[in-house]
Amino acid sequence: MIDRTNQIAGAAAAAPAKSRRRAGIGRRTAIAALLFAAPAFIMYAAFVLVPLAMSVFYSLQRWDGIGKMRFVGLNNYLIVLTDADLLQVIGNAFLLAAWFTLIPVVLGLAVAAAIREHLGGPFGTATRTILFLPQVIPLVAAGIAWSWMFANTGLVNQALRGIGLEALARGWLGDFTFALPAVGIIGAWVLLGLCTMLLVTGITKIDPSLYEAARLDGAGPWDEFIYITLPGLRQELGVCVTVTVIAALASFDIVYIATGGGPGIQTTVPGLEIYRLAFAHRQVGLASALAIFLMVLVLVCVLPIQWLTRVRR
Amino acid sequence: MKLKSVTATGLAALTAAALTGTAMAAPSCGADPVVMNAYFETGFPLPSKLAEEFTRQFPNVTFDIKEDQFANMMENSPRILSEDNAPDLIRLPSMSDLVANELLANLDGYFTEFGWDKFPPSQLIQLRVEEGGRPRGAGSLWAMGLNYSMTGVFYNKELAAKVGMTEPPKTLAELDALLQKAKDAGLVPIMQFNKGTGGLAFPLQDLMGSYGPPEPVNDWIFQKDGATINTEANLKAAEHLENWVKSGYFAADTNAIEYFQMMSRFTGGEGLFMFNGDWESGNLDKNFAGKFGFFLMPPAEAGGRHAAMSAPLTFGIGAKAAHQDCAAFFLNWVATNEQARQINVEVGGSNPGGPADLPIPAVTPGSVTEATLAAGNVVATENGAMDFIANATGAIFAAGWTPELQKLVGGVQTGKGLIEAVQAEYEKELSR
């Protein structure tokens, strides 16, 4: 009885000590975790959060980047939402998104489905390598090379003249109708490699027995594609669409090099306009407001894509 | 503040000189080693050639030269000038913003000390800005021209002979007739760039000079109160340009031609005329001797006044620069030293400016440079110099002229619409 009482008393006495120790360990773990996270967080804060906060701050000012700032409230956002030219610029980004996204994803899917059965062989390796090559070429170099091809004496016009379609030859990047599609094709060419790579990799994860079972059930290649390949690539498609939509909405390099935003403002995109507003017009406040608006726009477009293509459990 | 202190220094120096009865020594580079911090434009060798010659004559002065594209300079110059080690000499794409933010050294003191009052006042007028940044064309002197360039019409002599052009046209109607003849002969009448930046601004401004006096155009560029580009003469000019576009006088892919492509196609024999500046004279004389000629844009009526875009190759001195006296001495030397003027004409192809009584350096007879220098004299005599319409505000070229001129070529804008759109953009920029 005494023993038991002692035991109980001992246990009672030990319990707080144990929980104190556990609390101590918990605190130490928390501090250690914070210390481990700190370098990354400091970098993230310094290069993402602080500039973001500064952009928000600038977007509420009228400032030429050198002199004194003047608080103007939401006036810059009002300009972004009402200026006809700025609205066209934002619209251009969406038109470009159609080119940057549809072509690489559709062609990437087609290629992935076509070479699915030959992935291991030299044919599959060669196809993947060739299609991925544009991805390793700097965007500026791609823009310059394509500008030459689209020029009056470039490859595109040579080909048209070669097959007797001289009347169609034109300075593509200076044409009001064709400049934006031409830029879209450059972007699609650059992004095709990435999409193909992702989709080809994704397709290897699909269990081959599914295809065998479908074939035994009498499914044709089209049925296989619709009922096995497409659902199996849901996540990869999500990544492809997300990356290409962001590439279009936030594009700068290709447009800057290929057309400089012209003719008129036919190919001007928000990225280019932000740069111009900040450094040519010296309207840092308006440029920042457009930048923040662009960020929100990207999120608004990308979040539904992420939601639609997530794997449902 | 800056102005006051410089003026005060100038006054003190003047008083001191008067009191001691000695001649006042103009600022110089001294005898100690000096490394000039210079920021020049890529692709134009003249400033570097002048710096080389300067070091040859003054061995204690060397130059640390950084170069950048014009568009980058446009964006970077305020930040570079606001740093502690600001350039002693800097190519200035525009001045108003820099003056408003007190980033440039005021040159009024040097104006007096070097006797720049002997320069024709019209030469320096574009380099004057009122404090606060506007209007331009009056107020203190904030920069100097390394030379004074001018635009007009270059022509291919061989193609000119083909269309029967024996002498430059004397009226706009004669020029129109030649354009039509070239078109009929299956030639490209005008090779002009319009991609990236609106190269049709050159023929447009020349047409403005044909139809009307240069003063209202300058007032607009200098941002004088109430000035407008939407005048009757400018409207006629824009409509005339629209007619040229509709008549097919420009290459079909004009909106896809950049400046350097225009040069290579024109010098390659494509195009009878090219509207461009005398900064290409040296290049044409050196690489294509005898093949090209130059004439000033003819006036609308015979015997009318000639006007041309004529602008200084603007160089300023940083307000925070370490060697301001030496930089001013260099700018004075460029305009007055015999070798410097010779280099200026040979490499730059433009009028070296400077005191009116100094002779223009000799050039090869029959050369393009000879023609452009002579044309420069005509413009000076008839007081027909206009600043470039693209210089009216920091962004009017990128946001006004360029897109609207591209639309005009693309057939989606009229001459009238062009002028109205640019005026609206101008007012928007001044109001923001």
Image (cartoon, coloured by chain):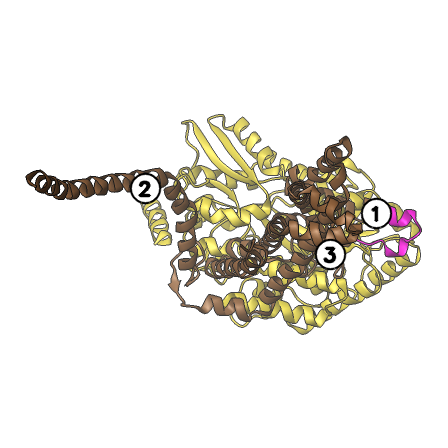
Residue A168 part of the magenta-drawn span: yes
Q: Colour of chain B?
A: yellow
Q: At which x and y percent is residue B257?
A: 75, 51
Q: Chain of mark 1?
A: B
- Judge left or right: residue B416 versus residue B84: right
Do the dots labelled 1 and 3 sit on one chain?
no
**Few, some or many residues within 10 Å of mark 2 (<14, 14–19, 20+):** few
Compare marks 2 and 3 and give the one earlier in the sequence.
2
Q: Which mark is residue A109?
A: none
Which residue is tagged 1?
Answer: B156
Residue ID at (35%, 37%): A36
Name the amino acid, label 2: Leu
**The colour assigned to chain A within the rendered structure:** brown
**Number of other residues with Cα within 10 Å of mark 3, as a class: few under 14, some 14 to 19, many 20 or more:** some
| Residue A16: % across, % down | 15, 44
Q: Is residue B315 left or right of residue A210?
A: left
Q: Which subunit holds the residue at mark 2? A: A
The chain identifier of the residue carrying mark 3 reads A
Q: Disc 1 vs disc 2: which is toward the camera? A: 2
Residue B193 visible to the viewer: no
Quadrant position of residue A148: top right
Q: CA distance from mark 2 to mark 3?
A: 49 Å
Which quadrant holds the N terminus of chain B? bottom left
What type is the residue that disc 3 sits on? Pro
Judged from the image, the secondary structure of the residue bearing numbered disc 3 is helix
Identify the residue under disc 2.
Answer: A34
In the rendered image, residue B399 lying in the magenta stretch gets the answer no
Please tell me which residue lies in front, B79 or A112.
A112
Residue A181's disc is 3
